[in-house]
Amino acid sequence: MTHPYFEGAAAPRVLAHRGLVREDSSVFDNSALALAAADAAGAEYVETDCRATSDGDAVLFHDETLQRLLGDPRPVAEVSTKELADLFAAHGGLLTLGEALEAFPALRFNVDVKARAAAADVGRAVARHGHRVLLTSFDDRNRRAALEAAHDAGAEVLPSSSGGRTTIALLLLASALRLTRWSRRILRGVDAVQIPERYGALRVFTPALVRAAHDAGVEVHVWTVNDPDRMRALVAAGADGIVTDRADLAIAALHPR
């Protein structure tokens, strides 16, 4: 059965990677203005990341530390929500996940649970929004912890989910060996696999993996693709979604009017 997260939305999926930020902008990725720009461009899906502040709040933030964005080596986990909000004020505005879900009721959220400390608050935040949320993490344990927290918070619809590194590695092997039943078992309880086209010299997006995922009723989303010609080629090869920094270009390329 198709999860509501995918129902009624355009295919192939365009997932705005951390929102939409122009190269010459002072706006931070994952900020309120970045999400607003993606929404204004017509994106139905936004990919975002969550880490926990020292207060335990799940905020939209990708990196482990503040170094890349602010030149500050402190881990996000050691900074209070208020201080982080103050630092973001001139760069698009900080959002907790709960605030983001309330502020953008029409968007569907792809939430990468970056840290185990964020899982409980992520689960609580998405409990009322499970129909428009997909949870993922490189570490499958983070994703499962967030799903469990959503269940414990009384979610009527559990979020959809995407498999992590272990799931993808096992699927890549099983699909290459044409082990159909094993592939289906690996993908049990998973609605999507979100993968790079390559990981170093290893090709991850393969015809065999796409076939195995589709056989199990699972979508394949490829990240992070910013060239329109490459987007079209991947979709032609079976990708169901493209994660991109340029949602505006992707929408024009994949959903021309």
Image (tube, rainbow, N blue to C red):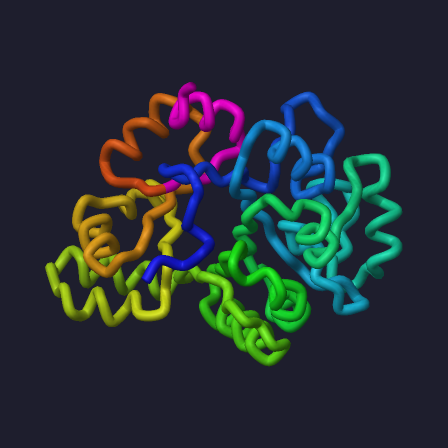
Query: Please, which residue is most extreme toward the bottom here?
Result: 152
Residue nearer the viewer, 151 or 67: 151
Residue at image x 37%, y 59%? Answer: 191
Query: Please, which residue is most extreme toward the front here?
Result: 8
Residue at image x 41%, y 37%? Answer: 10
Is residue 245 inside the magenta stretch?
yes
How many numbered discs? 0
Residue nearer the viewer, 138 or 8: 8
Residue at image x 42%, y 19%? Answer: 257
* For residue 245, side relative to residue 77 (left or right): left
Could you tell me residue 93's position as x and y percent?
79, 42
| 183 vs 100: above or below | below
Asked if one can make out residue 207 in the rendered structure from this viewpoint, the answer is yes
Could you tell me residue 190's position as x and y percent?
36, 64
Residue nearer the viewer, 130 or 235: 130
Residues rendered magenta in the picture: 241-257
Quarter occupied by the N terminus: bottom left
